[in-house]
Image (spheres, rainbow, N blue to C red):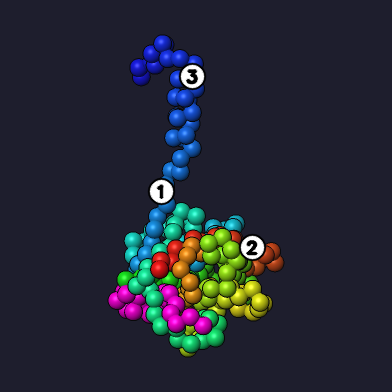
Amino acid sequence: MRAFNRALTVTGSLAAALAVAGLAASPAIAATTLGSGHVDVLDAEWDGADLHLHVHDEETATEYEPADVTLSVPAAAKVANPGYGFLGSGSQIWLLPDNEAVAESRGVLFPGISTEHLTTGVFANNAVTYRLVSATRNGATTEDFSIYAGSGSRWFDSNTGITTFKSRSFGVATHNHANWAFEEAGTYRLTFRVQGTVNGAVESATETYTVVVSS
């Protein structure tokens, strides 16, 4: 390796060192945006000692840390409000549907909730619980997010005025889909926890997901 020119000033040396340090501190993996296709947004895994939450892109068989992913909800996701009371009074909502063919036709995400990487005989009752810990939109607590199945059967609801629809149990080794609904455009930060009991001890993992809903 060729040595630096010794005529470099002290100030220049510091600047060079800082520049190198800055490069070293840069994230090794750039953030990824996922905006279409089959993606298990909540994907639980057990490594024998700890629970983990990942984002699993079924299209490319790629697994991501939630902090490294932005989920994009385009304007094409807007549909007429089906009129369920928990979806607010707006005429439209942004919907990531529970039907893969519909999601493909609109070019939007088909979001899943997965426990298929958890094997039977590990967790008590062969089940784990997903909890919606918090939800914000543009930095403020929001009531504009929910997940529901079928004709308005709520699984999760960010409404802070209620204590229900914050958690739901799922059997291990299962794959689940429901409608993800957003009532306003903006940047959402959704914090979820997965929890289960192993040999009498409660195990859990908590992650925050970024969702950008475009107007």
* Drawn side of residue 104 relative to residue 32, left or right: left
Cα–Cα span, label 1 and label 3: 31 Å
**Left-right relation of 128 to 66:** right
Q: Which type of secondary structure does the marked residue at label 3 adopt?
A: helix
Q: Identify which amino acid the numbered label 1 is placed on.
A: Ala
Between circles 1 and 3, the one closer to the viewer is 3
User: What separation in Å lies between label 2 and label 1 (alpha carbons)?
Assistant: 30 Å
For the point 53% across and 73% down, which residue is it? 145
The image's mark for residue 30 is 1
**Sequence-first disc among 2 and 1:** 1
The spot of residue 83 in percent (x, y) is 48, 87
User: Where does label 2 land, which residue?
Assistant: 203
Q: Which residues are magenta?
A: 89-106
N-terminal-most mark, 1 or 3: 3
Amino acid on which disc 3 is placed: Thr
**Residue 174 within the segment the image draws in magenta:** no
Q: What residue sits right under mark 3 in the picture?
A: 11
Rendered-image quadrant of the C terminus: bottom left
Mark 3 or 2: the one toward you: 3
How many discs mark residues in the rendered view?
3
Identified by mark 2, the residue type is: Glu
> Which residue sits furthest right?
200
Q: From the image, state whether disc 2 or disc 1 is nearer to you.
A: 1
Seen as rendered, the residue at the extreme top is 7
**First along the sequence among labels 3 and 2:** 3
